[in-house]
Amino acid sequence: MISWVIRKDEYLAIAREQHPAVILTTKDAWIWKAIAAVVMCLTFGGIGYREFLENYATTIGPVQAYPRQWSKLSRRLLVHECRHTAQCAWFGWAVPILGWFFPKLRPWVGLPLYGLAYLLIYLPLGLAFVRLCFEVDADRASYARMLIDGDSADRVLLRARAFAAKVCGGNYGWAWPKKWGLARFVKAAEEAIADYERAQAAA
């Protein structure tokens, strides 16, 4: 089996262009199995135990965990996950001293507040607006990367619609009503496409 781990240094360099604190790892350790069980419970089975471990990337602060069996990591995916690291770092600014003066610690010290916003501001199901916003923000950054790498506008919109269905479904704990969530993802994709086309026209 060819694993992305063979090219870990290359992927880490790409990720650290986005945020210098990023750490890449696999989901082999026991902690990820424990997290998988918790996530399965929180989503009432919306995402399965094996599905979490084998089909999803997961970012916790600066740590980004990817299934070992994946053969490669796309730039689009790395950009999306790095955006989550950056979101944790935003919350880190709220923590005096460690968050202000130590950039590589900022995602760690911001993680408790980020986690509260992403995970615990959770009920009622279907109205976790903060989680929706975090995911739209992360995916919007990845749309720009897709376009730079040669993907078409149609492919970007397809990605936006497919990911909206996941975020507004059981995989992400029914973050937001599907119709409204889809509209936000599509709008973000259209904005990214427009920005890219303006930049190309000006080049």
Image (cartoon, grey):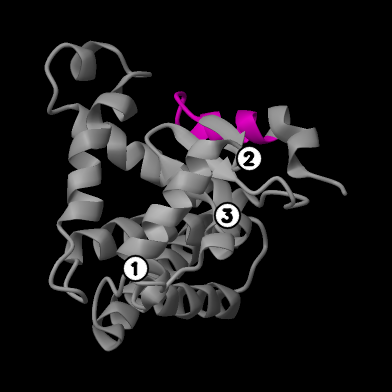
- Depth order, front residue of 193/60: 60
Which numbered circle lies on residue 28? Answer: 2
Amino acid, disc 1: Thr
Mark before the other along the chain sequence, 2 or 1 = 2
Is residue 190 visible in the rendered image? The answer is no
Instruction: Judge the density around disc 1: few (<14), some (14-19), many (≥20) Cα neighbours within 10 Å.
Output: some
Give the residues drawn in magenta, as a range.
Answer: 11-22
Give the prevailing secondary structure in the magenta stretch: helix
Instruction: Judge the density around disc 3: few (<14), some (14-19), many (≥20) Cα neighbours within 10 Å.
Output: many
Q: Position of residue 47 (x, y in %)?
A: 46, 69
Instruction: Tell me what residue is drawn at x 49 percent, y 29 percent.
Output: 22
Whole-angstrom CA distance, mark 3 to mark 1, is: 15 Å
Is residue 99 visible in the rendered image? The answer is yes
Residue lying at the far bottom of the rendered structure: 179
Mark before the other along the chain sequence, 3 or 2 = 2
Which numbered circle lies on residue 53? Answer: 3
Q: Give the left or right position of residue 17, taking residue 191 as reference.
A: right
Q: Give the left or right position of residue 89, taking residue 3 as reference.
A: left
Instruction: Tell me what residue is drawn at x 58 percent, y 54 percent.
Output: 53
Number of numbered discs on residues: 3
Q: Is residue 16 magenta?
A: yes
Q: Secondary structure at mark 2?
A: loop
Q: Is residue 31 magenta?
A: no
Residue that label 1 marks: 43
Q: Give the left or right position of residue 42, taking residue 195 as reference.
A: left
